[in-house]
Amino acid sequence: MKTTRYGSPRYAQKTDQRKERNIDGLTPEGLRLVLGQQAVREVIRVWAARTHSVLVQAGTGVRSQAIRRFAEDQGVTVQEVPRADLDRLAGGAFHQGVAAFAPPLEFTPWADLMLRADLLAVALDGVVDPQNFGAVIRSAVAIASAPVIWAESSSAPLSPTTFRASAGAIEHATLCRVQSLHGTLAEASAAGINVLGLAPDADEQLHEAALRGPTIVVIGSEQKGMGRSVRKACNRLVRLHQSGKVQSLNASVAAGISLYTSMTKLGVTNS
């Protein structure tokens, strides 16, 4: 593997357009670039010595040095680098003085999720902002240990921004990327799974709905909501209780509220 003088994989700076096409967020060497203190700490916690390397900005403060010691204790190679090098590596993204090169994320096949009798998952339709995508993953993991389902196209890439926005939660997440979201949801509905589409115009409120069995909560983009085909694939449309003073909620907030409400109604515990 080719390396720079700092021991990190050769990572050519990409344009935003190139990053959008790289849906797995991988470097040419097949590793993930992870930025930010909490995100890097979780990489080390989950992957330990399988973490390729950690880069720490020279002269940084106590928290960055604590991450350095944590990495070294786990047998991870740590390199001290100038801030300019981290800035170039991050391509303008916020790195907080630390970066890591982590193994690729693992994905769970949809066929495996369908077999879960206690399934409670969140599906994302058209969430293209990596900040929102990462924040939804954080809510899904923290509140319900819920799998996250999304389509290969018309979704945010798994980029360093997504990893950092999840605050490391993505390292613990059950991720299911499918070719067709509406096809997957239609299959789920036909199999008897509750497919609940969040829609502000729905007659039924989620907290009043009777729920039993495997459930998927579907959240659309903040601008357009669910697409027509995805909406049609849902077997129920529900809305969250709101004051009426705002038209929509942030995707991660909607995910958190809907997952917690569904957990309560289904009697599911976060394990």
Image (cartoon, rainbow, N blue to C red):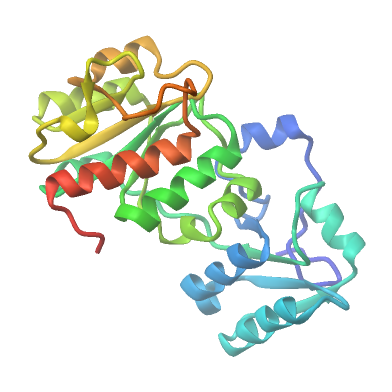
Q: On the rendered structure, is 211 left or right of 63?
A: left
Whole-percent x and y of residue 118? 14, 49
Question: Which residue is painted at 38% across and 55% down in the image?
Answer: 141
Camera-nearest residue between 148 and 262: 262
**Where does the N terminus fall, quadrant-wise?**
bottom right
Question: Which residue is painted at 53% across and 61% down in the image?
Answer: 168
Would you place residue 192 above or below residue 1 in this image? above
Question: Which residue is painted at 88% across and 61% down in the image?
Answer: 85
Q: On the rendered structure, is 146 left or right of 129?
A: left
Q: Residue furthest top?
A: 228
Whole-percent x and y of residue 15? 79, 35
Q: In the figure, residue 60 lies in which quadrant?
A: bottom right
Whole-percent x and y of residue 93? 76, 49
**Where does the C terminus fall, quadrant-wise?**
bottom left
Q: In the figure, residue 203 lies in which quadrant?
A: top left
Would you place residue 174 above or below residue 130 in this image? below
Can residue 176 be seen? no
Camera-nearest residue between 114 and 213: 213
Q: In the figure, residue 113 lies in which quadrant?
A: top left
Can residue 166 be seen? yes
Q: Residue furthest bottom?
A: 73
**Across the whole image, how many numbered discs are drawn on residues?**
0
Whole-percent x and y of residue 145? 31, 55
Q: On the rendered structure, is 214 left or right of 253?
A: left
Would you place residue 44 above or below residue 158 in this image? below
Question: Which residue is painted at 19% across and 38% down in the image?
Answer: 215
